[in-house]
Image: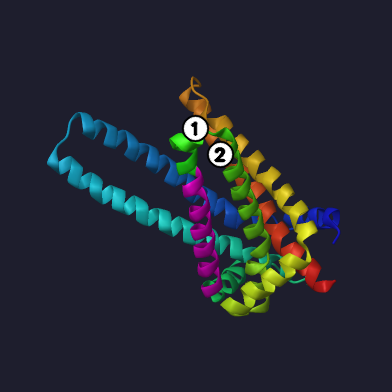
Amino acid sequence: MNLIEILKDSLALLRKEPKAFLPKLVTTFLYSVYFLWGARLTVTLYRLTDEPNTAGLSGMMVQVLLFFLFIVAILLADLLSYAMYPSIVAAHREGKQVKLLQSLKDAIRAWKVIITFGAIIFAVMTAISLPATMLALSPYGTGNPLLTAAAGILAIIAVIALSIAVFFVVPIAVVEHSGVIPTFLQSLKLGMKHTPELLQINLILLVLVTTSLIITMLSEFQGITAGLAIAAFIITRLVQALIYSYICVINPYVYLHVKEN
């Protein structure tokens, strides 16, 4: 597996098919709405705690419910947008015209696998993060840094193992149109076979994600004017969308490269 070739080809696709940025631009916009809405709700709740009133609290409960429903909708949209990229990459590699609507249809067709994939990721990450957080905040953790470090290392190992096991799930489901169990078994088989290469790829993706998060945090410095804050917010979100688009293209490129070789 030639990682340099895969990275270059992924970048070349985005240059030749700029429409491939659109799915992640849409989800980044939705996450920005979520961020701003959440900030507004927090301010409103803070004010209600100072001056509580029944009507205000009732209205706030409705807003909080709508907010959580919006979060669910965003997560589903994020999964679907991620699942569009195998179809986009496959069409590009075959010399066909990239059609976003067709890619969306291909992603929806694999909805069982995608929902299962999202549920497994959520369940495993929750199972890993909650005990680790509770240990770090407990007297046992704060008084025993070695124990906390060991728990952190185990959590990192578990995340790496999960990322390798499910790395190929979405591209297999979308490209091969396979069912839930065969898709996960095939992904696990390929992940175990190509573990060294996937470790390198996941390290690259981790660097890209970290870069995206750092860029996002740059827009949240205190003391800048409202105009600059808005401009920084918009620019950093755009850069974040570009980076995540690149990440989403790399994943199916790796699968197709493995499949063809």
Q: Position of residue 219 (x, y in %)?
A: 55, 31
Indicate whether 123 appears above or below 188.
above
Give the secondary structure at mark 2: helix
In-front residue for pair 44/199: 199
Q: Are marks 2 and 1 in contact (CB under 8 Å)?
A: yes
Kind of residue sitting beneath label 1: Thr
Q: Which residue is mark 2?
A: 148
Query: The magenta stretch spans which residues?
Result: 112-132
User: At 68% across and 53% down in the image, what residue appears?
Assistant: 247
- In the picture, measured across the screen, residue 121 lies left or right of residue 259, that is left
Indicate whether 189 appears above or below 30.
below
For label 2, the crowd category at 10 Å Cα-Cα, with few meaning under 14, some 14 to 19 and many 20 or more, is many
- In the picture, measured across the screen, residue 47 lies left or right of residue 147, that is left
Residue 87 in view here: no
- In the picture, measured across the screen, residue 119 lies left or right of residue 5, that is left
Does the magenta run of residues contain 157?
Answer: no
Give the secondary structure at mark 1: helix
Kind of residue sitting beneath label 2: Thr
User: At 57% across and 37% down in the image, what residue appears?
Assistant: 216
Write down the quadrant of residue 236 in the picture: top right
Residue 7 image label: none
Q: Position of residue 134 (x, y in %)?
A: 45, 43
Q: Main secondary structure of the magenta part?
A: helix
Residue 142 image label: 1
For label 1, the crowd category at 10 Å Cα-Cα, with few meaning under 14, some 14 to 19 and many 20 or more, is few
Does the magenta run of residues contain 125?
Answer: yes
Quarter holding the C terminus? bottom right
User: At 32% across and 53% down in the image, what residue appears?
Assistant: 66
User: At 54% across and 60% down in the image, what residue appears?
Assistant: 121
Q: Position of residue 9 (x, y in %)?
A: 81, 57
